[in-house]
Amino acid sequence: MLISVYAVLLLALLAYGLSVAGDLSNATFLADDAAMGTVIVLAAVFALAWFALLVTSYIALGPSRLPQQGQVLTGIVVGVLCVAVMSPFALTANYVVAARDSIGAIFPSHPDAEVPAAAKDPENPWGDKERVNFLLIGGDAAGNRTGVRTDSMNVASVDLKTGATVLFSLPRNLQHVRFPAGSPLHKQFPNGFMAELPNGGLLNEVWQYANDNPQLMGGRNKGPPAP
C-alpha cells in the first residue's frame, strides 16, 4: 500500500511539474505559508512511514535466526537503506523550510513603518511620474570579515510610458561621493564621503558606515537610503 501511494505521489508530482513548466502561475500557491507547512508535514510523515516499513519488514524476516555476523551486516544494510529512503524527504523539508523563512524575511507579516504605503490606485501606481529609478545592490560579506561591502551598485531608470530602461553602473571604488542635501550624511560629509582619510571613502563603504552609525542615520539598518 505504501509503495502504491508513493507511486501515485510521484506521478502527481510529475504531472504538477509539467503544468508548472507550461505556466509558472500554477506554482504561486506554494508560496503560501500554510501550503509550505503542509509540504513539510507530509515530507516528515512519508519519511517516517518508509522508515517504519523497512524496520518492520526487517523484523518480520526474523534476523535473530542469523549468526551474529549476519545480524550485524543486515542491520547495517537496513540502516543505510533507512537513511537512503528518508534523505529525499528530509532534503525536501529542508528546502521548503528555507524557502518559507526567506519569504517571511522578504515579505514580513508586519509592514515596516518606514516603507511607503502601497499605491491606492493599482491601475496607476506611479501617479503622474514619468520615470522611476530603482537601486539594485549586491552585497559582499563573509563570516570571517567585518561588515558588508556593496560591490555591485546599479540604478535602473525606467520610462513609465514606454518601459524603456537605462541601466547605470556605479563604480564601487568611486571616492569622496557627495550626498544630496536631504541625506542624513550630508552634514557629516559636506565635502564628500571621507570616512577613511586620505585615500578611503569608497562608495561601497557607505552602506556599512550608515549601519555602524545609527545615531547619524536616525535608526539601525539605514544603509540603503544613505546616498
Image: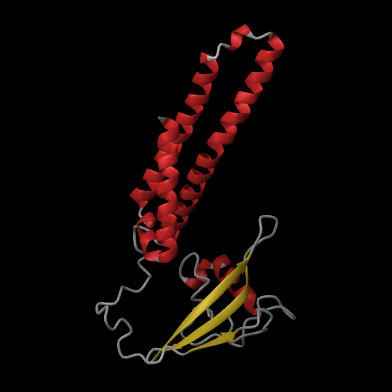
Counting from the top left corner in percent of width and height, residue 10 is at: 45, 45
The answer to whether one can see residue 53 in this image is yes
Counting from the top left corner in percent of width and height, residue 100 is at: 43, 52
* Residue at x 46%, y 49% (from the top left corner): 96
Counting from the top left corner in percent of width and height, residue 81 is at: 59, 30
* Residue at x 53%, y 79% (from the top left corner): 185
The N terminus - image quarter:
top left
Query: Where 111 falls versus 201 (above or below)?
Result: above
Furthest residue in direction left, as rendered: 121
- How many numbered discs, if any? 0
Query: Where 218 falls versus 187 (above or below)?
Result: above
Counting from the top left corner in percent of width and height, residue 176 is at: 65, 84
Q: Is residue 159 left or right of residue 78?
A: left
The answer to whether one can see residue 45 in this image is no
Nearer to the camera, 217 or 40: 40
Q: Is residue 131 left or right of residue 136?
A: left
Nearer to the camera, 135 or 62: 62
Residue 75: which quarter of the image? Answer: top right
* Residue at x 59%, y 35% (from the top left corner): 84
Furthest residue in direction right, as rendered: 199
* Residue at x 62%, y 81% (from the top left corner): 193
Q: Is residue 104 left or right of residue 65?
A: left
